[in-house]
């Protein structure tokens, strides 16, 4: 700590000032945290209340007696449209969409990044720019062409079709992540491997893949969150039976037969969000680390 | 009988519009140890990269074992290379780094192990085999990088400053090791260094580069005693060659050299050799190049080419085995290399013997050698 004051202020006074500042800082952070946690709190307490209690009590009050009925209904009994199977089948659909799409787009991104950073060819920068551009085209613009393509491939309304859509849309971001990460790997390492006799895929597999843990985590979290939370592609390119959980959630909340079951809606929303929460809790540490890890130390 | 291992003809290399290598010509026989020297940024690493096939050449021919290397990929050129920045694989252990080339070539595991052990003990890195590069010091990394090349048995080794980060003692040991390796394997080596002594002791051939051009290529002795121009003269040798402005004229006895020494009458010396490129009677301003060891104590030095003169000493620098005197000639600091027991103080006069048979003459305008 540098200290520029020349002894005019006494030591205790400075200590007090430090603690006050500290306190203010923590108070501010606390307020932000509360602000962000409030909706989650409301969701959790509401999901544990009975409908009567919800109608009678205030939004923020704690449940009088804890009651998991709403969760059970949301999981396996809530009605979306005509079916009343809860979220379970749709959650499973989302898994079947997200897992392959995340893995495939991450793999393609890694290869692309490897080529665009270490095997540059005439025009490779233009291709990179175009790829990036693809990532910033609004979803709505591609809906119609995409529907035509899926129809031509006879993938309309299927889960593989949705996987394809997410892979294509994800490639620009995964490529960007990997390319920027691999750019910081010294070029002489590639040269050394070439002289050692390794080819394109051997260098990728033996030299680059082992280096990639941080950026793989970043990419997987990013892609998983994007794909899991996607609604527009899900609602546009699915049909009854292949809908992802986000679409099902929407249907549950919007099916207006009888009374509005807020507790079921809340539990369903939490269930739909749990996988992404889980991924963040497990790998969030690496996410932050991966985002800041720019350099590869030789 | 020894064949040409490497020949480079009219090689040019541009990066964009920037000319990095200009008309480079090199020919190297099997078993040659070619050392490339030159100031930082003169294109030494680029030249090695071109030989290795890691950079495409702009024009010109590179042949290894008389085979044109155009379009041949690095892995098929049968070369091994040590990179200036080590370029170790960061996620592999030292052992894996060294055996990687054998692994991708699918060499038998037992053979890999045997070679690994040989190289590790040669380079004194046997205890480090399980470590990752990040856990090594600079010198250790450099030895691993050497090891990676030495496990191969290539036609041609390319070394880019492989000893620059070692401490003095280890460096000396490794230098001897490299020399031994060169002899025992009859290996052909292209070697980049900044170290004069390394260049002189290791090389069978030295190429001095500047600004992407080869200034001179020849045996260490040729480079040292007959530098092709003032740049080579100045660059090779430490302390470097004295370059003294003078006026010369061919006379009956040889070449007469007049050097301004701050007094009314110039210092006049006679070189018994005439300067061939000078017409009789023509007087010319030149730069006389004399190595410090060719200006020394007059005792026990006789011969037609020895001229003794008295000069005012500016600085005395004892260096253990020798004592260096600095004096002013032709307006330049001139260093003389005296025996260690020479007793002289700054501000006094000293008698110096000039061995003019060793003198080089250069044109001041172009730096070109005259004799
Ligand atoms: N990829 C590149 N693109 C553009 N210029 C380059 C590239 N690589 C090297 N250069 C330039 O080429 C010149 C020669 O570089 P090189 O690395 O061969 O020098 P060097 O003789 O090995 O120097 P040092 O002794 O410092 O290692 C330098 O001026 C450098 O800036
Ligand atoms: Mg270099």
Image: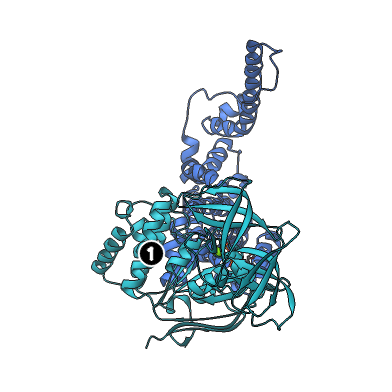
Q: Position of residue A230 (x, y in %)?
A: 60, 53
Q: Which quadrant of the view contains residue A131?
A: bottom right
Q: Locate the N terminus of chain B and report the quarter of the image it occupies.
A: bottom left
Q: Quadrant of residue B115?
A: bottom left
Q: Quadrant of ligand 1?
A: bottom right
Residue highlighted by disc 1: B148
Chain bearing mark 1: B
Q: Residue furthest right?
A: B264
Give the vertical position of B337 relative to B281 (above or below): above
Chain A shown in which color?
blue
| SS class, disc 1 | helix
Q: Which chain is cyan?
A: B
Q: How many marks?
A: 1
Cβ of mark 1 under 8 A from ligand 2: no
Residue nearest the observer in this picture, B229 or B305:
B305
Relative image position of residue B157 (x, y in whole percent):
42, 72
Q: Nearer the viewer, residue B87 or B3?
A: B3
Mark 1, other Cα within 10 Å: few <14 / some 14–19 / many ≥20: many
**Quick check: can you spot residue B180?**
yes
In this rendering, does residue A146 appear at all? no
């Amino acid at each position: 700590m540098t200290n520029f004051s020349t002894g005019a202020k006494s030591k205790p006074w400075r200590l007090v000032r430090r603690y006050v500042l500290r306190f203010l800082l923590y108070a501010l952070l606390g307020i932000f945290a509360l602000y962000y946690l409030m909706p989650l709190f409301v969701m959790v307490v509401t999901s544990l209340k009975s409908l009567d209690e919800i109608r009678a009590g205030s939004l923020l009050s704690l449940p009088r007696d804890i009651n998991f009925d709403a969760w059970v209904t949301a999981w396996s009994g809530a009605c979306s449209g005509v079916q009343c199977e809860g979220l379970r089948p749709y959650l499973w659909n989302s898994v079947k969409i997200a897992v392959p799409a995340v893995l495939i787009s991450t793999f393609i991104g890694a290869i692309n990044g490897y080529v665009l950073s270490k095997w540059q060819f005439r025009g490779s920068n233009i291709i990179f720019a175009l790829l990036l551009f693809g990532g910033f085209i609004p979803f709505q613009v591609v809906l119609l062409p995409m529907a035509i393509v899926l129809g031509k491939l006879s993938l309309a309304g299927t889960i593989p079709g949705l996987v394809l859509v997410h892979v294509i849309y994800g490639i620009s971001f995964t490529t960007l992540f990997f390319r920027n990460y691999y750019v910081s790997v010294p070029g002489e390492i590639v040269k050394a491997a070439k002289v050692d006799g390794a080819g394109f895929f051997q260098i990728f597999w033996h030299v680059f893949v082992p280096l990639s843990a941080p950026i793989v985590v970043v990419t997987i979290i990013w892609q998983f969150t994007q794909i899991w939370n996607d609604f527009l592609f899900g609602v546009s390119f699915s049909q009854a039976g292949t809908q992802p959980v986000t679409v099902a959630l929407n249907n549950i909340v919007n099916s207006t037969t009888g009374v509005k079951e807020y507790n079921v809606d809340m539990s369903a929303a939490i269930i739909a969000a749990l996988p992404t929460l889980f991924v963040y809790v497990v790998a969030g540490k690496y996410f932050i680390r991966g985002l800041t890890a720019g350099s590869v130390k030789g | 009988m020894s064949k040409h291992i490497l020949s480079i003809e009219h090689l040019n290399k541009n990066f964009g519009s920037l000319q990095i290598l200009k008309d480079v010509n090199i020919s190297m026989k099997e078993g040659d140890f070619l050392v490339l020297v030159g100031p930082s940024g003169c294109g030494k690493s680029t030249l090695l990269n071109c030989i290795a096939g890691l950079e495409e050449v702009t024009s010109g021919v590179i042949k290894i074992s008389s085979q044109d290397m155009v379009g041949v990929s690095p892995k098929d050129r049968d070369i091994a290379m040590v990179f200036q920045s080590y370029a170790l694989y960061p996620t592999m252990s030292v052992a894996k780094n060294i055996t990687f080339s054998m692994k991708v070539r699918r060499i038998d595991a037992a053979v890999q192990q045997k070679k690994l052990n040989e190289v590790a003990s040669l380079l004194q890195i046997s205890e480090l085999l399980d470590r990752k590069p990040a856990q090594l010091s600079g010198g250790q990394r450099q030895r691993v990088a050497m090891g990676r090349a030495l496990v191969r048995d290539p036609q041609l080794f390319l070394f880019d400053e492989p000893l620059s980060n070692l401490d003095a003692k280890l460096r000396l040991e490794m230098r001897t090791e490299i020399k031994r390796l060169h002899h025992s394997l009859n290996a052909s080596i292209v070697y980049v260094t900044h170290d004069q002594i390394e260049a002189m002791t290791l090389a069978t051939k030295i190429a001095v580069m500047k600004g992407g051009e080869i200034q001179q290529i020849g045996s260490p002795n040729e480079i040292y005693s007959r530098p092709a121009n003032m740049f080579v003269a100045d660059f090779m040798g430490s302390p470097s060659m004295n370059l003294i402005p003078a006026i010369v004229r061919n006379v009956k006895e040889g070449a007469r050299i007049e050097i301004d020494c701050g007094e009314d009458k110039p210092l006049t010396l006679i070189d018994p050799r005439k300067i061939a490129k000078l017409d009789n009677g023509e007087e010319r301003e030149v730069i006389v190049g004399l190595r410090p060891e060719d200006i020394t104590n007059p005792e026990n030095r006789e011969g037609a080419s020895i001229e003794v003169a008295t000069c005012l000493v500016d600085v005395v620098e004892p260096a253990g085995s020798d004592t260096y005197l600095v004096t002013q000639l032709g307006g330049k600091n001139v260093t003389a290399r005296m025996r260690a027991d020479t007793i002289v103080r700054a501000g006094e006069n000293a008698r110096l013997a000039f061995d003019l048979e060793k003198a080089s003459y250069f044109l001041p305008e172009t730096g070109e050698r005259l004799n």
